Amino acid sequence: DSNIQKVVPEQDWMKQTDAEFCEKERENLFYSQQSFKAEVATLKQHFNQSGGVHILQYMYGCSRDDETEQTEGFGQLGYNGENFLEYDMKTLTWKSLKQQPNFMQDEWNSDTSRLLFWKNYFTQTCIECLKKQVDNRKSTLMRTVPPSVSLLQKSPSSPVTCHATGFYPSGVMVFWQKDG
């Protein structure tokens, strides 16, 4: 909640998260908010924009294969609807997706503390957070809900339609059995 500067868990699985994690997230989000403001100002200046609404979007995250324990991270920045910067996990650097704004690639890659932050984020912080959240959500993710089934027939001579809804997980197979 940006009004009170606190992380407020809304989902039941998120309420199981420890206070230390929430405080760490609050600090990260506060830092990100300040960083966003500075980066939007830099981009506006670079593109000679003085007014109007401009959107800076960070998209980042990670994945982990439980069987192989292989992990992957991704990071991308977009400005006003166009992606322009992407994190390269092989070189641990930021790559420009366009000729402009190459200045940001150079600036970010020359900032060793920023590079170290993202390397640590993608290889450790994000993975630890992902594991923690999956553990907290296991009861939700592993649940099974049987379908509600309705049989519909408009008239005695029309075909019968089976309608199954409300099931989880989504990959369910429904079989018809005559006299079953």
Image (tube, helix red, strand yellow):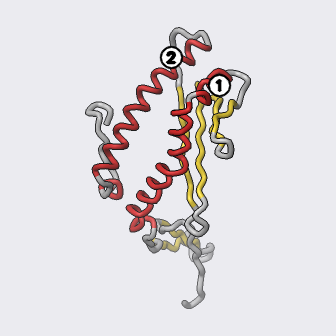
Residue shown at the point (40%, 65%) measured from the top left: 140
Residue shown at the point (45%, 55%) measured from the top left: 128
Residue shown at the point (46%, 59%) measured from the top left: 131
Q: Residue furthest bottom?
A: 179
In the image, residue 136 above or below residue 59: below
Which quadrant would residue 100 be assigned to in this image? top right
- Spatial CA distance of label 1 from label 2 is 17 Å
Residue shown at the point (54%, 17%) measured from the top left: 42
179 or 104, nearer to the observer:
104
Q: Return the disc, 1 or 2, that comes first in the chain's sequence.
A: 2
Q: Which quadrant of the rendered structure holds the N terminus?
A: top left
Q: Mark 2 points at which residue?
A: 41
User: As shown in the figure, which amino acid type bears the numbered disc 2?
Assistant: Ala
Assess disc 2: are there few (<14), some (14-19) or many (≥20) residues with their C-alpha within 10 Å of its C-alpha.
some
Q: What element carries label 2?
A: helix
Position in image of residue 2 (x %, y %) = 32, 32
In the image, residue 144 above or below residue 95: below
Count the labels in the image: 2
Position in image of residue 142 (x %, y %) = 45, 70
Residue 106 is labelled as 1
Q: Which quadrant of the rendered structure holds the C terminus?
A: bottom right
User: As shown in the figure, which amino acid type bears the numbered disc 1?
Assistant: Asp
Q: What element carries label 1?
A: helix
Residue mark closest to the camera, 1 vs 2: 1
